[in-house]
Amino acid sequence: MRKFFAVLLSVMLLASLIVLPASAEEAVTLDNIKIGFVHISDPSDMGYTYNHDLGTQKMKAELGLRDDQIINKYNIPESDECADAIQELIDDGCNIIFATSFGFESYMLAAAAENPDVEFCHATGYQAAGSGLANMHNYFGKIFQARYLSGIVAGEKTLQTGNNMLGYVAAMPFAEVISGYTSFYLGAKSVNPDVTMKVMYTNSWNDPTKEAQVAQALVDAGCGVISQHCDSTATATTCENNGVFHVGYNSSMIAVAPNASLTSAVWDWSKYLLYAVNSLVSGEPIATDWAGDLASGMCDISEINEAITAPGTDEAVAAARAAIISGDLQVFAGPLTGSGTNFDGSAATIDLAAGQFFDESSTQSAPSWNYIVPGVEVVGE
């Protein structure tokens, strides 16, 4: 009997030393999941991160998550501080991590390679497919569809005011930004063939001071409606202070510029967050590339400022929205030409004949339209 208990004790001690493989660990559920976020700014920007945070809160409410299940890292620069933030989220037990700025991708890739049991989801990036990492994912959406609709709002306003010159405060000379201002311009041109557009870069995703300076330069250049791809409301308030009109990005900016802001191209990031988290909890694979669209509600325009928009704007937007959703209207449709620069720095051109169109997001979630079209002029930085 003593021998039996001695053997039993030895077996129990040996079992206590065995580390269970990941597959035998506690399953991830909505009750125990931890979700991490890395943001380049914070919700006070009232733009990009604010809009992402709205998506997080919507996801949290819909899934019934607790506050302690979500960890946000705000105001993280695109530097080694991002790697530190990601590691802190891993150390805190996060099962899935979302990073929302383009320059975070290399740090996400490195962390994904070292932590195969954590899912890494990166917005706006393009390297997940080529990484060979099953736990690395890219996500974005067909925001060019919403940009086109916001361009229609701007174009209708140019017809009313008689000022055919648009302006655009752009963050970086990347495809994401070029795709955005091109689709905005094409939307405006669809209702006013005489529009032209001046583009100026800030070379920063979030620099309210520089955004205000660039917006002022575009006002001084004679632009009557100015849109933006930058994170803050500085462009909106500059337009308000100068008596010109504005189309925003990420969130409705009518509250800060009631006499200027016509509408905004906006996101509902909860569409992806819900998809990714539910996939993880149910044991389903998360797509390597994912892009929501106008039909899914991933992107759209915010409310239209009826007090200052041109008559007929609602009807024009509704018709275009229906045509985009049905597939009858393609944003980057021929005849259309443009020239730009590939990712490797080489020159690139495109020449779409009538009946042809550029199907952005068909092979990757990240934007890939990288061409400057006739009528659009990059005027300085």
Image (tube, rainbow, N blue to C red):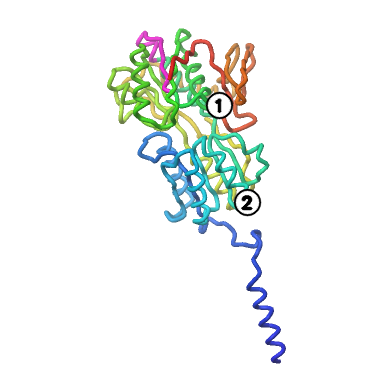
Quadrant location of residue 154? top left
Q: Is residue 103 above or below residue 11?
A: above
Task: Give how far apart the Cα atoms at labels 1 and 2 are.
Answer: 38 Å
- Percent coordinates x, y for residue 188 in the rendering: 46, 15
Q: Is residue 163 inside the magenta stretch?
A: yes
* Residues rendered magenta in the picture: 157-169
Amino acid carrying label 1: it is: Ile
Residue beneath the point at 49% across and 32% down: 299
Read off the residue under disc 1: 325
- Residue 27 is labelled as none
Note whether 113 is above or below 300 in the view shown. Answer: below
Q: Secondary structure at mark 1?
A: helix
Q: Earlier in the sequence, mark 1 or mark 2?
A: 2
Quadrant holding the N terminus? bottom right
Local SS, label 2: loop
Examine the structure image and report whether residue 140 is included in the region drawn in magenta: no
**Circle 1/circle 2 CB separation < 8 Å:** no
Residue 95 position, x and y percent, is 55, 53
| Residue nearer the viewer, 234 or 183 | 234
Disc 2: CA contacts within 10 A as few (<14), some (14-19) or many (>=20): some
Q: Residue 303 location in percent, x, y?
A: 39, 29
